[in-house]
């Protein structure tokens, strides 16, 4: 279990963990509020994206590379949806895609960290 | 190692964004609460009589027959006598009829209120050299312990050797126009309690007497209406009260208004003089109670201050002053915008507001419904309306008119010029009317509106007027995809807020079960800044807002829980409820909860920018938009009220108008970035801007002194616009002419 490694995590591993928690929280907000929005007849993007984000964040917290790739998948979905909704209008793309993209850069940087965690787990036979 | 450092930095940036998650603490939208109490009936449509039992509401004002509270007649003036309007002496030609080239003789410079100056020293080529010539401090700003209700909104006038202005609390002064040195100052000792929603004095009126010979005191006078409802006349040369006017230079305008408290009723605009008749209107604090003091319009003799006539909406055939314990009909539409006079037609154009209790119309009389949110042309000889043009029928959206009408000539069908009037509205619909009969010159269509609405006994009208011949100063109806934010988190918050509310366009009927979105909101479209019009080029300059509101009617029970009470309730505390916010609407079945349509956690509007625009319309060639762009940068605005410092012209909410000059420039502040700017009239390019010491929520003006052009702006700020309050009049000139 990953919990056994808490004691000797490196800084980057801690930060990856924190990033995962942040993504879970954002994802939960998306799921809860996005579900209300969808029920009120609004966009279904948020609830769907929220599910992806929660999964992504949970996997990152667990130290699994798939978490990062799930986030990047959610990011791709976000861009496709944003462009579909507002086209190439910068002022409208800003609230939709800027934050997720910045977060995406961080997530991208965690891929080697997650890989290292996974390798370590494999070596110890604790997958 | 290096990579982990980078990661750490990046992660810290992310963590800094975590407060966004605070949005997750989702509050009930509109704070209107759940509709637990049953929807009450329409109530009694008649003004209470002297024997009507008191209201059963937890908070409520006294009977309209109760005496006026102490201090309402601020100067303890005796009643003013009446005189026959036919005995008003013939008026001599006034300065404002044909201002000298370098003067700015009235609020909108001249009798037509064009806000156009023929001065041309400052041009798009040299405007970037403008420097501060002088600053004048009026001395009126909130003192410690006082709620900030300040927004001076003042525009000085300039006649001959004087720059005449008022402070936010109505002290009157004459300044040297070249140096800003105070020549005289007349303090009127207005009390803090008399400040209504806003301490504002938009300006004073210059009047030349036909009765007092030239060279005698009070031949030229400065007239002012005050927050504490006095009409004051002082000598333009000395600032001394005009003994021959009213009682020692003052008239008590609370006479005949019945029960009131200080701050309920007030004057904030300069009274126009038409053919010797000085006409006064006043604001009545919005949202307080159905039976608020009357919105009566009155005419007085500009020479003697004697009462001439009243236009009292629910007593249309009685133009006299009430006597004894009687009062002007209560709750009638008030008019708080600057009025425009027309000596040739003998009319005053009154932009009206709404009946008291803005958001509930079931208790309004048919007479009120005809004249609310309208232009009413009143004959200054009789006080009777000659024509009425309504800009919103049975208004329950606070689409009251804040703008002053501008007079101009439109080409008629036979090539002859038609005397026209341009009436901007908060709706962003600009109506162009024939001054003689009020008939639209440019087409107006009655279009279907949501009807009857949801409030029992208070149906909406099936149609509303749209000025299809003028460019609409608004954006299309809001959509979910117009919601905005810094991130998808706050955007999602606003999307949910949008979907939780009723919204079927501009005339979405009020509702009690859930909030409704009001766009345009009460800030406009066009508000009190009005428009400027260059009669030479035919270019009309309009600045306007895109600031939706989030409204909800609440049951009386809920209103009591929220502590909503009218200003004349004994429990009322100053600052406890303003004109443009939650209101008790005592006497109706509902209270009203109004907030900007914003994210209350970040303080950012929910809709996408821009929030403020400026538009130039070519009135000579088919009313086409010449240019249009956002007004105001993000430098002083941002999430959580933090200034971003960004020069990005995002388009901010704005209050205050523009000046257009023969030099081909538009001068305007208005935006919440606290800047004044000069814009090329023909291209819309901003050629100069400067940061003001306070918010520039005032109409600027321009004048000439010692052969050089000056531009003046009151940087008084605005409490509701959340711009810094100051008491400084800032005057600019080209560098060689600093004072």
Image: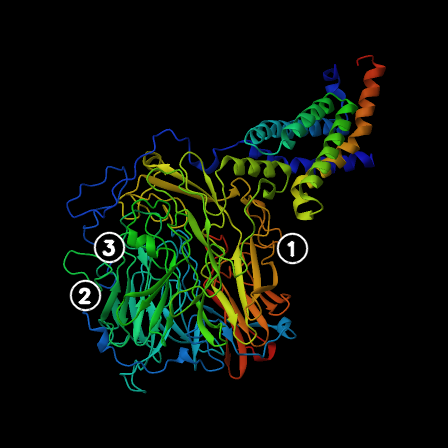
Output the chain of dot 3: B
Of mark 3 and mark 1, the one earlier in the sequence is 3
Q: In what element is the residue under mark 2? A: loop
Residue at coordinates 42% horizontally, 36% vertically from top-left? B32
- Label 3 to label 1: alpha-carbon separation: 50 Å
- Label 2 to label 1: alpha-carbon separation: 56 Å
- Label 2 to label 3: alpha-carbon separation: 19 Å
Q: Mark 3 sits on what residue? A: B329
| Labels 3 and 1 within one chain | yes
Q: Mark 2 sits on what residue? A: B79
Q: Position of residue B278 (x, y in %)?
A: 31, 71
Residue B685 placement: quadrant: bottom right
Disc 2: CA contacts within 10 A as few (<14), some (14-19) or many (>=20): some
Q: Mark 1 sits on what residue? A: B648
Output the chain of dot 1: B
Q: Position of residue B523 (x, y in %)?
A: 47, 53
**In the figure, is residue B531 to the left or right of A42?**
left
Residue at coordinates 30% horizontally, 60% vertically from top-left? B228
Which of pointers 3 and 1 indicates the residue nearer the eye?
3
Q: Are marks 2 and 1 in contact (CB under 8 Å)?
A: no
Residue at coordinates 57% horizontally, 51% vertically from top-left? B637
Residue at coordinates 20% horizontally, 73% vertically from top-left? B84
Which of pointers 2 and 3 indicates the residue nearer the eye?
3
């Amino acid at each position: 279990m990953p919990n056994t490694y808490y004691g000797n995590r490196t800084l980057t591993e801690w930060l990856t963990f924190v990033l995962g928690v942040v993504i879970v929280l954002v994802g939960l907000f998306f799921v809860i509020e996005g579900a209300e929005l969808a029920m009120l007849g609004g966009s279904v993007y948020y609830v769907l994206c929220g599910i992806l984000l929660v999964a992504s964040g949970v996997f990152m917290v667990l130290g699994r590379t798939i978490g990062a790739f799930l986030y990047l998948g959610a990011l791709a979905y976000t861009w496709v949806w944003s462009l579909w909704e507002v086209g190439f209008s910068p002022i409208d793309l800003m609230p939709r895609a800027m934050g997720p993209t910045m977060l995406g850069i961080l997530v991208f940087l965690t891929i080697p960290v997650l890989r290292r965690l996974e390798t370590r787990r494999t070596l110890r036979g604790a997958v | 190692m290096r990579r982990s450092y980078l990661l750490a930095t990046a992660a810290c940036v992310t963590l800094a964004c975590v407060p966004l998650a605070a949005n997750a603490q989702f509050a009930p939208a509109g704070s209107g609460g759940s509709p637990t109490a049953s929807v009450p009936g329409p109530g009694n449509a008649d003004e209470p009589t002297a024997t009507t039992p008191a209201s059963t509401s937890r908070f409520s004002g006294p009977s309209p027959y109760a005496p006026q509270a102490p201090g309402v007649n601020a100067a303890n003036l005796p009643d003013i006598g009446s005189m026959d309007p036919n005995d008003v002496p013939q008026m001599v030609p006034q300065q404002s009829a044909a201002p000298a080239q370098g003067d700015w003789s009235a609020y909108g410079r001249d009798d037509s209120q064009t806000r156009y100056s023929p001065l041309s020293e400052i041009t798009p080529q040299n405007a970037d050299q403008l420097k501060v010539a002088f600053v004048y401090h009026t001395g009126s700003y909130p003192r410690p312990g006082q709620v900030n209700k300040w927004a001076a909104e003042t525009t000085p006038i300039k006649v001959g050797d004087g720059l005449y202005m008022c402070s936010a609390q109505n002290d009157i002064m004459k300044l040297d126009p070249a140096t800003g040195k105070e020549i005289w100052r007349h303090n009127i000792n207005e009390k803090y309690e008399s400040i209504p929603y806003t301490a504002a004095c938009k300006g004073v009126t210059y009047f030349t007497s036909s009765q007092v010979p030239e060279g005698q005191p009070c031949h030229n006078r400065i007239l002012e209406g005050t927050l504490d409802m006095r009409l004051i006349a002082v000598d333009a040369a000395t600032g001394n009260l005009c003994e021959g006017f009213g009682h020692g230079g003052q008239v008590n305008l609370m006479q005949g208004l019945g029960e009131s408290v200080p701050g309920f009723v007030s004057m904030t605009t300069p009274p126009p003089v038409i053919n010797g008749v000085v006409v006064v209107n006043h604001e009545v604090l919005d949202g307080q109670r159905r039976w608020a003091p009357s919105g009566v319009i009155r005419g007085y003799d500009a020479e003697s201050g004697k009462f001439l006539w009243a236009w009292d909406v629910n007593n249309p055939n009685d133009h006299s002053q009430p006597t004894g314990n009687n009062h002007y009909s209560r709750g009638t539409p008030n008019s708080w915008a600057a009025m425009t006079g027309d000596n040739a037609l003998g009319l005053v154009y009154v932009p009206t507001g709404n009946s008291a209790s803005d958001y509930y119309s079931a208790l309004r009389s048919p007479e009120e419904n005809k004249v609310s949110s309208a232009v009413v042309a009143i004959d200054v000889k009789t006080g009777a309306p000659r024509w009425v043009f309504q800009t919103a029928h049975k208004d329950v959206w606070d689409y009251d008119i804040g703008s002053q009408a501008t007079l101009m000539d439109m080409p008629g069908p036979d090539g002859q010029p038609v005397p026209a009037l341009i009436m901007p509205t908060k709706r962003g619909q600009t109506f162009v009317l024939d001054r003689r009969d009020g008939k639209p010159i440019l087409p107006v269509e009655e279009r279907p509106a949501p009807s009857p609405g949801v409030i029992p006994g208070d149906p909406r009208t099936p149609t509303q007027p749209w000025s299809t011949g003028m460019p609409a100063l608004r954006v299309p109806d809001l959509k979910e995809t117009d919601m905005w934010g810094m991130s998808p988190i706050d955007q999602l918050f606003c999307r949910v807020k949008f979907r939780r509310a009723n919204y079927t366009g501009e005339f979405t009927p009020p509702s009690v079960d859930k909030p409704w979105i009001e766009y345009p909101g009460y800030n406009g479209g066009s508000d009190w800044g009005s428009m400027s019009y260059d009669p030479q080029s035919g270019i009309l300059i309009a600045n306007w807002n895109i600031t939706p509101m989030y409204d909800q009617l609440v049951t009386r029970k809920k209103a009591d829980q929220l502590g909503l009470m009218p200003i004349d309730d004994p429990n009322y505390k100053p600052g406890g409820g303003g004109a443009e916010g939650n209101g008790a609407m005592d006497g109706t079945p509902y209270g009203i909860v109004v907030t900007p349509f914003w994210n209350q956690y970040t303080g950012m509007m929910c809709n996408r920018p821009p929030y403020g625009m400026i538009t130039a319309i070519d009135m000579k060639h088919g009313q086409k938009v010449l240019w249009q762009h956002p007004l105001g940068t993000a430098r002083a605005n941002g999430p959580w009220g933090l200034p971003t410092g960004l020069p990005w012209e995002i388009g901010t909410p704005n209050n205050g108008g523009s000046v257009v000059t023969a030099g081909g420039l538009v001068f305007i502040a208005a935006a919440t970035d606290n800047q004044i700017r000069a814009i090329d009239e023909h291209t819309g390019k901003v050629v100069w801007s400067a940061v003001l010491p306070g918010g520039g929520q005032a109409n600027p003006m321009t004048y000439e002194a010692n052969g050089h052009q000056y531009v003046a702006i009151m940087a008084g700020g605005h409490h509701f616009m959340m711009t810094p309050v100051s008491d400084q009049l800032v005057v600019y000139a080209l560098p060689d002419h600093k004072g």
